Image (cartoon, grey):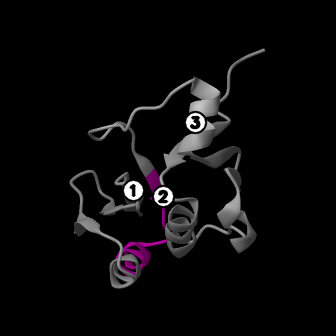
Amino acid sequence: MGIKLDMVGIVVKDMKKALAFYRALGLDIPESADAEPHVEVAQDGFRLAFDTRETAIGVYGGWDEPSGHRIELAFACGSGEDVNGRYAALVRDGYEGYREPWDAFWGQRYAIVKDPDGNLISLFA
C-alpha cells in the first residue's frame, strides 16, 4: 500500500475564532463545532482539521507556540476577481491582510491573509 496525504491539522488558540475565519473564507463548518476540541472538514480527498491546544498537548505530550512561517495553506478560488473579493471581504470583516492581491510572476492572481492564529493563508486563481 502506498502513502497518501489524508489530513492537515492546525492547532488553534480559540476554536470559535478560528472556525469563524475559515467560514468567512468559504468553508462549510457548522457553528455547533465551535465548542469542540477537534473539528474536521472534508476537502476533496483530504481533511482539514482543527485542534485546541489542549487536544494537541494530549496527542503530542506537550506543545510549544510556533514562530515563523512553517507551512502554507493555499486555497484555489474560481477567478482573479474571486481572489480580490474574498481578500477584501476578509479584511472588511476584521481579519489581517498580509499581502493585497497581485498578479504573480508565475501567472496566478494571488493574495495572502492571516488567520486568527497568525498562519499565512494564500488565495489564488
Say above or below: 63 vs 30: above
How far apart are labels 2 and 3 at the CA level? 24 Å
Which mark identifies residue 75? 2
Residue carrying label 1 = 121
Q: Residue furthest top?
A: 1
- Asked if disc 2 and disc 3 are in contact, CB closer than 8 Å, the reply is no
| Along the line of sight, the residue nearer the viewer: 88 or 110 | 88
- Quadrant, the N terminus: top right
Q: Given the image, on which type of amino acid does mark 2 rest?
A: Phe
Q: Given the image, on which type of amino acid does mark 3 rest?
A: Ala
- Between disc 1 and disc 2, the foreground one is 1
| Along the line of sight, the residue nearer the viewer: 25 or 108 | 25
For image coordinates 47% across by 31% down, the residue present is 63
- Between disc 2 and disc 3, the foreground one is 3
Side (left or right) of 62 relative to 98: right
For image coordinates 29% across by 41% down, the residue present is 69
Pick whichever of labels 1 and 2 is earlier in the sequence. 2
Magenta segment, which residues?
A: 74-87
Give the quarter of the image for residue 71: top left
Q: Is residue 86 visible?
A: yes
For image coordinates 37% across by 38% down, the residue present is 65
- Asked if disc 1 and disc 2 are in contact, CB closer than 8 Å, the reply is yes
- Between disc 1 and disc 3, the foreground one is 3
Residue carrying label 3 = 56
The picture places residue 15, in percent across and down from the top left corner, at 57, 59
Q: Mark 1 falls on what kind of element? A: strand
Say above or below: 71 vs 1: below
Q: Given the image, on which type of amino acid does mark 1 rest?
A: Ile
Which mark identifies residue 82? none
| Along the line of sight, the residue nearer the viewer: 113 or 66 | 66
